[in-house]
Image (tube, rainbow, N blue to C red):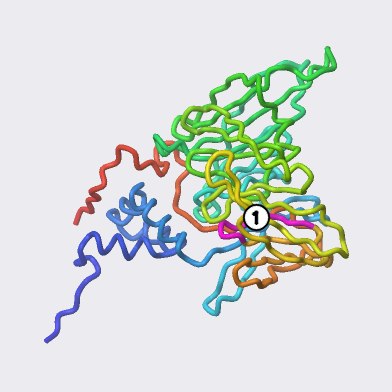
């Protein structure tokens, strides 16, 4: 008589491999089954393994909206069903987050985490998959009524030496008394493991010199911004908390540009100014190393594009057309895929998104430095 095997009798490494390929929703339910699965799924090694596996799965899409009827911001997540059809599900932020804030701005996701912020100087981290939402501590380096916060930029990345998540907040203040900009620029760096900010002064770069990118610009320990004139980019070193200036080709200055990732390179998406009714092509230039740029591919021509809203890591471009329809263009398949149409407002940004188990608990970040790689599950 054939004896049936029990799942609990499988080798530990096989159990880990099987579970690491399950969706986040299933894993959150399995944490309630027994203690050993809870310990396994909470382990940073397992979280990293699951993150690696989900990056090889079909990508979802996250679209950030502003709704005119409610004057509130929200989002739509597009998931693929079994027939590979995109299924949208829309939410208002205050309906899913532990906050009354109606308007958030969003920085593109990193390992399934979003950075949210607003003009009231609220800053938070959010994992939509696990529903964790973490407001960051208040940071007011110049708490003086004579100084008004008038310009700021954010960055979000990982410190390679520790695996810790960091938020960079570059701020410029207007001096009401002297009617001039306060100098120097203040840079605040938040570290997730300590749940604290560190402030320092920057004399060579101002947040007014930088432009927020539509896509993700964190790569290998650096967060990148482009300059307003496209003549250079700036890189924040997450290990040393230093800013590096990198030159771009002179031809970039006369073009319309945006900074994002392309096949694991920092890339500039360059085009002539978009004019309705005129064809537009986008040239993708990659930075092979600091200051060395190569034109990789030309995408298009497109017709009746209003604007681009974001980019995927493999060159996908999210574009809004004149009918307010949001499309994804794949440069390799040379095909458009319709995401949807925003009837009661307009889309602000669009991102490729992979779910993750990465935790926002101070002591549970996905830090593999110094971790014991031998995972023990008690039988």
Asked which quadrant contains residue 371, the reply is: top left
Asked which quadrant contains residue 62, the reply is: bottom right
255 left or right, relative to 196: right
Is any part of residue 74 visible from this angle?
A: no
User: Along the line of sight, which residue is nearer the eye, 10 or 160?
Assistant: 160
79 left or right, relative to 255: left
Image coords of residue 10 (percent x, y): 21, 66
Magenta residues span: 307-315
Task: Write the residue at 58% across / 35% down.
Answer: 235
| In the image, farthest residue toward the top | 178
Image coords of residue 329 (percent x, y): 67, 66
- Element under disc 1: strand
Q: Is residue 42 above or below residue 136?
A: below
User: Along the line of sight, which residue is nearer the eye, 344 or 270?
Assistant: 270
Task: Write the residue at 72% across / 48% down.
Answer: 257
Image coords of residue 300 (percent x, y): 72, 65
């Amino acid at each position: 008589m054939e004896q049936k095997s029990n799942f609990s009798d499988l080798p530990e490494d096989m159990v880990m491999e099987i579970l690491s390929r399950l969706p986040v929703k299933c894993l959150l339910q399995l944490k309630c089954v027994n203690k050993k699965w809870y310990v396994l799924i909470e382990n940073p090694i397992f979280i990293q393994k699951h993150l690696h596996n989900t990056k090889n799965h079909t990508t979802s899409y996250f679209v950030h909206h502003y709704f005119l009827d409610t004057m509130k911001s929200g989002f739509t997540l597009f998931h693929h069903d079994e027939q590979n059809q995109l299924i949208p599900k829309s939410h208002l932020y205050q309906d899913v987050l532990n906050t009354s804030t109606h308007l958030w701005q969003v920085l593109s996701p990193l390992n399934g985490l979003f950075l949210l912020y607003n003009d009231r100087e609220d800053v938070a981290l959010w994992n939509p998959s696990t529903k964790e939402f973490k407001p960051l501590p208040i940071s007011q380096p110049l708490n003086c009524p004579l100084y008004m916060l008038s310009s700021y930029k954010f960055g979000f990345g990982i410190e390679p030496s520790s695996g810790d998540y960091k938020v960079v907040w570059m701020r410029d203040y207007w001096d009401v008394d002297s009617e001039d900009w306060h100098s120097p620029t203040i840079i605040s760096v938040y570290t997730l493991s300590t749940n604290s900010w560190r402030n320092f002064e920057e004399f060579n770069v101002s947040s007014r010199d930088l432009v927020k990118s539509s896509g993700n610009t964190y790569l290998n320990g650096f967060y990148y911004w482009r300059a307003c004139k496209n003549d250079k980019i700036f890189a924040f070193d997450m290990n040393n908390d230093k800013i590096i200036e990198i030159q771009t080709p002179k031809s970039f200055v006369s073009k319309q540009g945006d900074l994002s990732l392309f096949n694991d390179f920092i890339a500039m998406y360059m085009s002539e100014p978009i004019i309705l009714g005129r064809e537009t092509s986008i040239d993708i230039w990659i930075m092979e190393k600091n200051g060395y740029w190569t034109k990789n591919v030309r995408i298009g021509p497109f017709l009746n594009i209003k604007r681009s809203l974001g980019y995927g890591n493999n060159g996908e471009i999210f574009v809004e057309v004149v009918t307010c329809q949001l499309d994804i263009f794949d440069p390799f398949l040379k095909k458009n895929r319709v995401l949807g149409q925003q009837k009661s407002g307009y889309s602000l940004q669009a991102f490729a998104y992979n779910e993750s188990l990465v935790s926002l608990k101070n002591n549970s970040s996905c830090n593999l430095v110094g971790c014991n790689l031998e995972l023990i599950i008690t039988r």
